[in-house]
Image (spheres, rainbow, N blue to C red):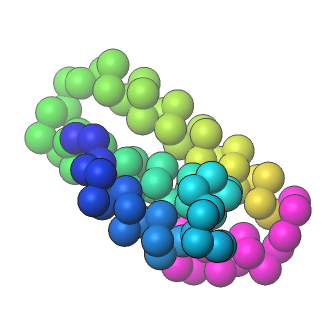
Amino acid sequence: MALLKEHRKEIMKKFRRSDLDTGSPEVQVALLTFRILGLTEHFKEHKLDIHGRIGMRDLVNQRKSLLQYLKRKDQTRFNTLVKELDLRG
């Protein structure tokens, strides 16, 4: 299920760096994470949705790339984001 507009705004408000920020790596990773969590719930019920799994794999790879970029650019922002989203174990 796609994220509703209200949910997207809440996520952006929580993870943005300034008032007009909608595209920072933190916001993008947070939005991708919540989309991935929604798809994970979908796959618990629809085990044979192979095409959906391919799309989810692409989302996971995109999130991984953004996290690698953020880790390279600013380690402290990376660490706080990983803690807030409860990623990596």
Q: Residue at x 74, y 75 (%)?
A: 77
Q: What residue appears at the point 15 percent right and 33 percent down from the top-left corner? A: 46
Q: To which quarter of the image does residue 79 belong?
A: bottom right
Does the rendering let one see residue 23?
A: yes
Corner quadrant of residue 73: bottom right
What residue is at 60 percent from the left and 64 percent from the top?
20
Q: Looking at the picture, how far across and down is residue 65, in whole percent?
A: 70, 44
- Locate residue 49 relative to residue 68 in the image: left or right: left
Which contiguous range is marked in magenta? 72-87
Say whether residue 8 is left or right of residue 15: left
Magenta stretch: helix, strand or loop mostly: helix
User: Looking at the image, is 46 positioned above or below residue 8?
Assistant: above
Q: Furthest residue to the left?
A: 45
In the rendered image of this protein, does residue 67 appear above or below residue 45? below
- Indicate left or right for 72 with 50 as reference: right
From the top left corner, tell me how far across and down residue 23 is, in percent.
62, 52
Total tally of numbered discs in the picture: 0
**Quadrant location, the N terminus:** top left
| Residue 62: % across, % down | 61, 39
Does the magenta portion include 75? Answer: yes
Q: Is residue 38 visible?
A: no
Q: Give the farthest residue toward the top.
A: 51
Of 48 and 29, nearer the camera is 29
Image location (x, y in percent) of residue 16: 58, 69
